Image (cartoon, grey):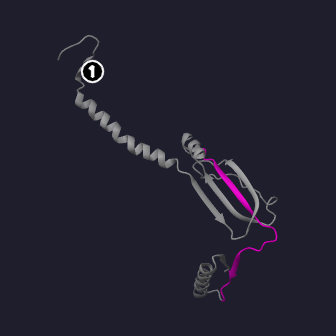
Amino acid sequence: MPRYPGYSIMSARLSPISCLRGSRMKRSFRVPLALALFSSMACFHAVITTGRAESSTVVEQEWAKSWVAGLVPPDVMDVSKQCASGVAKVETQHSFLNLLVQWLTIDIFSPMDIKVTCAGAGMAPKTSMITPSENTPAAERNAMAQAVERADRTGEAVFVRF
């Protein structure tokens, strides 16, 4: 094996083929890593509606503190003073910046944005109620079927009271 000044024996043993294998390996991990990072940056958005008519009053809490990938939820928002007629809609969202912070903290800190839309004062909820005639499984299935049919026909929320 030829010796050159400034080169160690280890560097002389490395062949161009072994260097190419390492770079192929590195290249093969780039695409899955890029896809994992890209998919982790998606914005999550959930909307919960109560079926009540919405008012123009909206209460927002940005960067609500959640921990351990959301396993420890943020503190409860008390909107009873702002929403005297109740709540019409609750939205939670993880924005790009929220998810970036969550990713940088390895899911320890998981912030989210919360938006509560109040129900309109004096407005009746756009819902109806169905109560089974008896406390039997057949009557409960019949009430659920009626609720599904009515909700499909009217496009409004239908509650079933057991």
> With respect to residue 138, does 18 lie above or below?
above
The furthest residue to the left: 1
User: Which residue lies at the image location 60% right of the left edge and 49% below the top edge?
Assistant: 95
Q: Nearer the viewer, residue 23 or 161?
A: 23
The furthest residue to the top: 5
- The magenta span reads 108-133
Q: Image quadrant for the C terminus? A: bottom right
**Residue 146, image x, y percentages:** 61, 84
Q: Quadrant of residue 152?
A: bottom right
> With respect to residue 3, does 27 lie above or below?
below
> With respect to residue 141, does 93 lie above or below?
above
Q: Image quadrant for the N terminus? A: top left
Please state if 61 lies on the left or on the right of 13 as rendered: right
> With respect to residue 135, does 26 lie above or below?
above
Considering the numbered disc 1 on the image, is that residue within a helix, a strand or a loop?
A: helix
Amino acid type, label 1: Ser
**Residue 160, image x, y percentages:** 66, 79
User: Which residue lies at the image location 72% right of the left edge and 53% below the top edge?
Assistant: 60
The furthest residue to the front: 56
The furthest residue to the bottom: 133
Q: Nearer the viewer, residue 53 or 129?
A: 53
* Mark 1 surroundings within 10 Å by alpha-carbon count, few (fewer than 14), some (14 through 19), many (20 or more): few
- The image shows a total of numbered marks equal to 1
Whether residue 113 appears in magenta in the rendering, the answer is yes
Q: Quadrant of residue 29?
A: top left
Please state if 15 lies on the left or on the right of 129 as rendered: left
Please state if 155 lies on the left or on the right of 32 as rendered: right
Q: Nearer the viewer, residue 157 or 70?
A: 157
Which residue is disc 1 drawn over? Answer: 11
User: Which residue lies at the image location 69% right of the left edge and 68% below the top edge?
Assistant: 50
**Residue 107, image x, y percentages:** 56, 45
Whether residue 80 appears in magenta in the rendering, the answer is no
